[in-house]
């Protein structure tokens, strides 16, 4: 099994040196930030429910986004087979008549300030599927789905970060290009798997 300790040993081998623990932590953090911004694969998808709380004086409701949330794939009301809500910009959502008056079921939503807002209705249970951040590598024995299944992505993003710390910008750019190519391939393969039928989503309970 590939672990954080094995990854760091490989990074040290590339640079023929041992990075200090603080620098190791920074390298891992930068690599994981790059992966979070760009990678969207099945292993990052969870599904669950969010319960809206009514917003006084409106026909809308809101709920905090789940921990680790990155991006919604779907938001529907009451049934996973029900129609998906339409996502709007915050400007469009808060100026819509349905935000101020109307009754459920909700048919539009927006994201602003760490909250999901939906209207009209305001107190429904939403069924959601979303991309969540992978577990960070903090302990020597830690691993996650990307490290286990796409080790080269972690390696190249870490080499990119380490090279930037070393001010070897040519090496950083080279490894950024490698990592970006892997992400493009993984995202493309994930889209193809969703069309043809992929792994089931992880089911989780969200909120109270």
Image: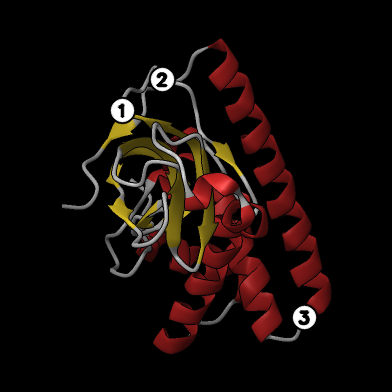
**Secondary element type, mark 3:** loop
- The answer to whether 118 is drawn above or below residue 41 in the figure is below
- The answer to whether 136 is drawn above or below residue 25 in the figure is above
Q: Nearer the viewer, residue 111 or 204?
A: 111
**Secondary element type, mark 1:** loop
Looking at the rendering, in which quadrant would you find the N terminus?
Answer: top left
Q: Nearer the viewer, residue 32 or 98?
A: 98
Is the image coloured rainbow, by chain, by secondary structure, or in one colour? secondary structure
Residue drawn at x 78%, y 56% is: 177
Write down the residue under mark 1.
78
- The answer to whether 139 is drawn above or below residue 191 in the figure is below
Q: Nearer the viewer, residue 34 or 150?
A: 34
Task: Kindly identify which numbered label has been placed on residue 82.
Answer: 2
Write down the residue under mark 3.
168
Coordinates of residue 193 in the picture (x, y in percent): 56, 20
Instruction: Give the CA distance from mark 3 to mark 2.
Output: 52 Å
Task: Give the mark nearest the N terminus, 3 or 2.
Answer: 2
- Quarter assignment of residue 184: top right
**Left or right position of 29 against 15:** left
Task: Give the mark nearest the N terminus, 3 or 1.
Answer: 1
Label 2–label 1 contact, CB within 8 A: yes
């Amino acid at each position: 099994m590939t672990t954080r300790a094995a990854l760091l040993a490989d990074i040290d081998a590339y640079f023929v040196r041992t990075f200090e623990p603080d620098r190791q932590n920074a390298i891992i953090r930068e690599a994981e930030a790059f992966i979070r911004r760009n990678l969207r694969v099945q292993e990052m998808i969870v599904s669950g429910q969010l319960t809206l709380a009514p917003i006084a004086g409106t026909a809308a409701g809101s709920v905090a986004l789940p921990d680790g949330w990155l991006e919604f794939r779907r938001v529907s009301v009451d049934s996973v087979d029900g129609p998906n809500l339409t996502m709007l910009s915050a400007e469009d959502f808060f100026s819509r008549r349905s935000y101020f008056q109307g009754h459920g079921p909700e048919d539009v939503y927006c994201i602003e300030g760490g909250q999901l807002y939906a209207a009209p209705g305001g107190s429904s249970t939403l069924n959601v599927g979303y991309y969540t951040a992978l577990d960070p590598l903090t302990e020597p024995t830690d691993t996650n789905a990307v490290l286990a299944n796409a080790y080269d992505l972690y390696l190249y993003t870490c080499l990119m970060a380490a090279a930037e710390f070393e001010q070897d910008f040519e090496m950083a750019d080279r490894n950024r290009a490698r990592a970006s190519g892997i992400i493009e391939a993984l995202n493309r393969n994930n889209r193809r798997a969703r069309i043809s039928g992929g792994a089931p989503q992880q089911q989780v309970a969200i909120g109270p």
